[in-house]
Amino acid sequence: LKNPRAFYSLMLLMQFALMGVFIARDAFLFYLFYELTLIPVYFICAIWGGERSIPITIKFFIYTLAGSLIMLIAILYLYFKVPGNHSFDIAAFYALSLTPSEQSWIFLAFFLAFAVKIPVFPFHTWQPDTYTVSPMAGTMLLAGLMLKMGIYGLIRFVLPIVPQGVAQWSNLTMTLCIIGIVYASLIALRQQDLKRLVAYSSIAHVGLMTAGVLSANEVAIQGAVIQMFNHGVNTVAIFFMIDLIEKRYNTRMMNELGGVAGQMKKFGVFFFVILLGNVGLPLTNGFIGEFLLLLGIYQKSTWAAAFAGLTLILGAAYMFRLYRKVFFGQASNQHFDRGDIKKWESWTIIPLCTMIILIGIYPSFLLNISEKSVEQILILFNQNNMVTGSL
């Protein structure tokens, strides 16, 4: 790693900005931290990324910046709508009585900004390329935390402030989410690059979470919240394992790998546990979130739940295909320097695998943490929906 001080300084700046996004109680501060995340990501990807990293990073930067500027317009409009001393306090935004037409365009402004970050189809095109060229540490932060900013923004801003906007645009937004789920899953089935496969898998999973949030019922939102955490654990774990494969075999292409299970038995066991969590097998952490999401989406739309359920089937198909080809396929090159998982590597992966199993067995502790917050968001959603309906 060249210039490690600069790299880790940027990583710390990125974590600082991410923490600011999730704890901000002021909409303008939220926006500042939301934009601040772009700066370290840009330099991490451009300087330490792979081939073609600069044009791909510029594409990512322009995409997200354009969406965020639209959100800034909506935030400023809400600021001037607060009576008396204008305020960016998010609680003051919750108390506003907005007309259906105001809610409609404000919803679009927020949704476009968050849809790029999540990303929702068709705003996803930056993600696979950015994941591919990013250094692995940057990819883990992108997948584990940055994508969650958009879903968090939908829950924190969109549901309580513009409930009528959610209802007005629900058919279109739900359709985009479902198309993204199916499209990304089918594309993942065709991938040879392990990072791109997981990138498309991530698009499918966050599409399911977004559909759950926009269903606007307690079961689906609770599922989205717990799945945000679980997806972060699973995605970080699988990217870490892919990085270990690439370091040992100097490739992450499936058609250039094979027979890994015979060389790395412990590694194969850990990878299989992570794979099960990613496909949502019962008694793993991925199951409870996906189950609640599908149940909540079903309450909103039967057809949407039916198509969303394809994530489970297609997800199992491309993940087990990956495992079969990489771990039990025909080895195409016998001259790589191999070695099973090392002690320091196991210190990273054992806690992640433990969380995958423990949350799958005992998910209620996560559900209990988020339950009151979800209930409060829905109280605001219903209150503002009733107030708007009476205007």
Image: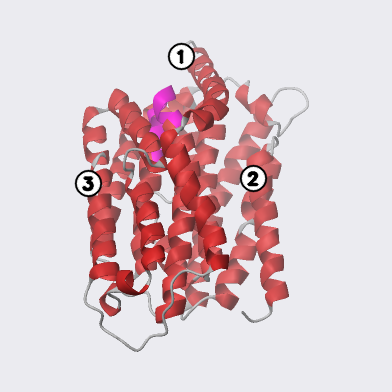
Q: Residues within 10 Å of mark 1 (few under 14, many from 20)?
A: few
Pick whichever, 379 or 73, lies toward us.
379
Judge depth for marks 1 and 3 and give the one in front. 3
Residue 374 visible here: yes
Cα distance in 3D space between marks 2 and 1 = 31 Å
In the image: residue 212, left or right of residue 92: left
**CA separation in Å, label 1 and label 3:** 40 Å
Name the residue tied to disc 3.
Answer: 313
Report the magenta residues as a range.
209-222
CA gap, disc 3 and disc 2: 34 Å
Disc nearest the viewer among 2 and 1: 2
For residue 86, above or below residue 340 = above
Instruction: State the residue at coordinates (40%, 40%).
Output: 209
Q: How many marks?
A: 3
Residue 163: x %, y % from top left: 47, 25
Q: Which residue is mark 1?
A: 389
Q: Amino acid at mark 1?
A: Gly
The residue labelled by disc 2 is 21
Q: Earlier in the sequence, mark 1 or mark 3?
A: 3
